C-alpha cells in the first residue's frame, strides 16, 4: 500500500506547478503589451510602469511556484534558476521604460532598455529549456515529443531575433561617415548597393520585423505551457479518483 504522505506532497507540488504555468501563460503576453506601451505612451506611462512591474513580478512568482516540483532533479532546477534570473533582471529594469520615455536623450536609460529587451528574449529562451526539462519528467510521450520539437524551433527563432536586434542596433548607431568610408572601400558596386539596401531596411523595418518574428516563439511557448498544464491537471484528477 502506498504511503499517502508522499502522494499528498506530490499533489501539492503539482498544484503549485499548474498555478505557476497559469501565471506564465497569462503574464507573458500582458507583460509584452504593457512594456511596449510604457516605452511609447505619454500620459499613461506612469500607470503603465506600475502594471509592467506587477506583470514581471507575476512571471517571477510563476517560476517560483514551479520550483516546488521535483526538488531533487538538478537539471530541471538549473534551467529554472536561469529563467528566474532573467525574470528578476526584467523586474529590476522595468522602471527604465518610464525613465527612457521621459528622458530619451539620456544614454544610460537607453542602455538599460536595451538590456531589458535582450533579457526579455533570453527569458523566453530559458523558459523553453524549462518546458523541455519539465516535459521530460511528465508521463506523456506525445507532450515530450512535441515539446522537444517546438522548443528547438523556438530557440533558433530567438537566436535570429537576437542577431536582428544586434544588427538593427548597429545600423541605428552607425555613423554615416563610417558608412561612406565602407562604401568607398567596396569596389563592387552591386555589393555596395546591397549593403545600402540592407542598412535602409534595418533602419525602417528592423524593430517591426523583430517583433513579428518574436511573436511566433511566444505563441508556441504559450501553447506548450497550456498543453503542459492540461497534462498536469489530468494527472492530479486521476490521482484523486
Image (tube, rainbow, N blue to C red):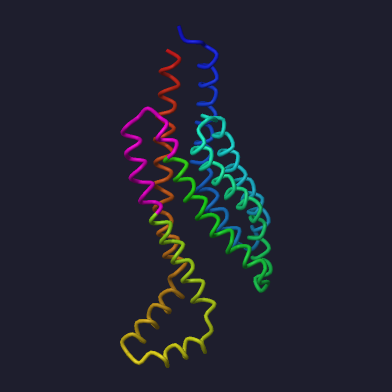
Residue 211 appears in which quarter of the rendering?
bottom left
Horizontal and vertical percent for residue 9? 55, 20
Q: Residue furthest top?
A: 1
Residue 222 appears in which quarter of the rendering?
top left
Residue at x 35% of width, y 29% of height? 140
Q: Is residue 115 visible?
A: yes
* Residue 43 painted magenta: no
Quadrant, the C terminus: top left
The answer to whether 184 appears left or right of 82 in the picture is: left
Q: Is residue 40 visible?
A: no
Say above or below: 180 vs 52. Answer: below
Horizontal and vertical percent for residue 80? 53, 41
Frontmost residue, 65 versus 69: 69
Frontmost residue, 23 versus 163: 163
Magenta span covers which residues?
133-155
Residue 142 appears in which quarter of the rendering?
top left
Frontmost residue, 88 versus 34: 88
Residue at x 41% of width, y 60% of height? 212
The answer to whether 30 appears left or right of 194 in the picture is: right
Residue at x 50% of width, y 16% of height? 7
Dominant secondary structure of the residues highlighted in magenta in the image = helix
Horizontal and vertical percent for residue 40? 58, 63
Amino acid at each position: 500500500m502506498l504511503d499517502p504522505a508522499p502522494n499528498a506532497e506530490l499533489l501539492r507540488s503539482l498544484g503549485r506547478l499548474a498555478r505557476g504555468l497559469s501565471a506564465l501563460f497569462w503574464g507573458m503576453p500582458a507583460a509584452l503589451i504593457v512594456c511596449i506601451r510604457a516605452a511609447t505612451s505619454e500620459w499613461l506611462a506612469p500607470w503603465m510602469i506600475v502594471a509592467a512591474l506587477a506583470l514581471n513580478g507575476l512571471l517571477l512568482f510563476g517560476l517560483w511556484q514551479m520550483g516546488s516540483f521535483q526538488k531533487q532533479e538538478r537539471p530541471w532546477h538549473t534551467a529554472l534558476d536561469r529563467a528566474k534570473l532573467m525574470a528578476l533582471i526584467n523586474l529590476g529594469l522595468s522602471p527604465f521604460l518610464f525613465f527612457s520615455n521621459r528622458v530619451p536623450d539620456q544614454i544610460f536609460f537607453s542602455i538599460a532598455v536595451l538590456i531589458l529587451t535582450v533579457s526579455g528574449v533570453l527569458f523566453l529562451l530559458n523558459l523553453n529549456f524549462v518546458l523541455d526539462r519539465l516535459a521530460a519528467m511528465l508521463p506523456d510521450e506525445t507532450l515530450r515529443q512535441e515539446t522537444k520539437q517546438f522548443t528547438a524551433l523556438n530557440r533558433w527563432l530567438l537566436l535570429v531575433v537576437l542577431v536582428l536586434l544586434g544588427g538593427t542596433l548597429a545600423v541605428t548607431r552607425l555613423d554615416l561617415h563610417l558608412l561612406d568610408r565602407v562604401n568607398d572601400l567596396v569596389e563592387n558596386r552591386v555589393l555596395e548597393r546591397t549593403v545600402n539596401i540592407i542598412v535602409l531596411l534595418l533602419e525602417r523595418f528592423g524593430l517591426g520585423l523583430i517583433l513579428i518574428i518574436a511573436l511566433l516563439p511566444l505563441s508556441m511557448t504559450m501553447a506548450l505551457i497550456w498543453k503542459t498544464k492540461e497534462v498536469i491537471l489530468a494527472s492530479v484528477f486521476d490521482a484523486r479518483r
